[in-house]
Image: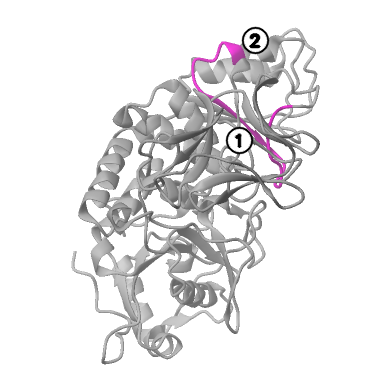
Amino acid sequence: MTPPAPAYSGAKGGAVMRICIINTGGTITCTGSPLAPMPPARFAQAVTDLLGPALAAALPGDSLHLDDGLRFSEHGPGVLDSTDLRPSDWCRMAGRVLDLYDDHDAFVILHGTDTMDYSGAALSLLLNVTGRLGLPVATLSKPVILTGAQLPLFLQTPQGLALNLGSDGLANLTGALRAARLRLPEVVVFFGGVLLRGNRALKVSTTRFAAFDSPHLPPLAEVGITIRPGAAPALPGPASGAHALDATPARARVRAQLAAIAARIDDQRIVQIPAVPADHRAADPLLAQMIRAALAAGATGLLLEGFGEGNIPAGDGAIEAALRKAPVPVVIASRAIGGQVGAFHYAAGAWIAATGALPAGDMTPVAALAKLMILNAVADHHGWDRATRDALMIRSLAGECTPTDRLQGPLLPGQSLTAADGPVALVNDPETGPCLTLHGRVLWQAPGPGLLRMRGDRLVLIAPDGHLAWASAASPAPDAVAILTAHPPALHLVDPAGEAVPVTLLPC
């Protein structure tokens, strides 16, 4: 379908940015009683007629195009309330972005609030391809901004459509368009004046205009009188021009991956089970019954929401036995909004690690569910075995969790790295210095205390008095990434532009 006329065009001399608005439906586009999304062409015309001059004044020089080519169904308006979106619809959204990629500098996706956080998490993984170590090999290079509203942008009156002055829709739409000028190369959510990483966002309110929050990552930016950078850094974007989706081969890799995922994602049955206070000492605890029932019904993965740091009662062994027998991946997240799951070091949950369940770290349950579904759907396409898929579930692929297996700054005394693929740790002991351990057995010990950091193309140990106590071999890539692995147990320097020929640093 040919897109409608733009709401406004840039001034002569060229547009500052070419921004495309993709309409998926949602409250922001709704009218009537009960509320239902308008046909995209009608919504686009309303934006052009009622907001065109104001948008042109607010964003001088930019060129805004309203796309009505995305269809989830051939029946009705073709768009949906986000409650009705299926996982394969995430693939349709990603595919539309790829179809329009060359013609625009940024994308604003209008989306319902009910599942905006799911789509934000999924799109961040669908628009990037990563290798076995979690480093991107085909990477989004333009902003993709999801936004919507708690109240419709327009009202139906006897005189026709009118702007709804009580809605948050106009502020969210114009804020998202202004945030596009930051050109952050990632999927984000703009809502209530803040720009959040899409795979870190959670819907936290149905009544306040500040409907979304990010419990583990501060905003990337805040939009008010001016656009202020947030405390969290943006993702770095492509490692080279060849890896950016602007390049035809990189975009082809993403399209091939997307096709493989789209063919299988609706067959994924990830069952989310919360732990609740109950008599877990019963002969057959309810939680154990729920796990077995989910598996018997064909679950392809389990997402358990534990208490606190992922603690789950063992149930006198019955729950542990049910998890040990699970033939599908099991991920443990925290039911606490700001909770994170690590090494299961509380006695109440120490047994979990032995079952093979994977800790979600500081991923939200929303992001963990979308990620597990996508990894399951794409594993065969990439030839990933179970161990590789499990390690990728723990690794940060698109900023959805804090990496625990790579050096992102100096490793200070008292800090540590943990491998994603096994029980290997690099611990910087304040007294003896960094050491590499496997099940507590020391594989390598630094010559003394200090901080471990990258300096140019080498990893170095800086002693407390400031002198260079140790230096690794040089890396062929000056911007190499230090990644800890368990197979083999070592710290490697890896070229971020392709994961080619890592340099093993430790053990030396």
Q: Residue at x 37, y 32 (%)?
A: 377
Provide the residue designation for mark 1: 360
On screen, residue 418 above or below 128? above
Residues under numbered marks 1 and 2 in contact, where contact means CB atoms less than 8 Å apart: no
- Number of labels in the image equals 2
The amino acid beneath tag 1 is Ala
Residue 55 placement (x, y as % from top left):
42, 85
Q: How far separated are the C-alphas under marks 1 and 2?
A: 21 Å
Residue 426 placement (x, y as % from top left):
64, 33
Provide the residue designation for mark 2: 321
* Classed neighbour count for the residue bearing mark 1: other residues with Cα under 10 Å, few (<14), some (14–19), many (≥20): many
Residue 394 placement (x, y as % from top left):
55, 34
Asked if residue 331 is among those painted magenta in the image, a careful observer would answer: yes
In the displayed structure image, the side of residue 362 where residue 347 appears, left or right: right
User: Which structural element holds mark 2?
Assistant: helix
Q: Which residue lies furthest to the top in this view?
A: 283
Q: What stretch is highlighted in magenta?
A: 323-344
Q: Which residue lies furthest to the left in this view?
A: 2
Mark 1 vs 2, N-terminal side: 2
User: Which structural element holds mark 1?
Assistant: loop
Q: Quadrant of residue 319?
A: top right
* Classed neighbour count for the residue bearing mark 2: other residues with Cα under 10 Å, few (<14), some (14–19), many (≥20): some
In the displayed structure image, the side of residue 52 where residue 297 appears, left or right: right
Asked if residue 333 is among those painted magenta in the image, a careful observer would answer: yes
Picture colour scheme? one colour
The amino acid beneath tag 2 is Ala
Residue 429 placement (x, y as % from top left):
76, 35
Considering depth in this image, is 400 or 485 the residue closer to the camera?
A: 485
In the displayed structure image, the side of residue 345 where residue 18 appears, left or right: left
Name the main secondary structure of what is drawn in magenta.
Answer: loop
**Between marks 1 and 2 in the image, the one whose residue lies nearer the viewer:** 1
Q: Can residue 74 be seen from the camera position used here?
A: no
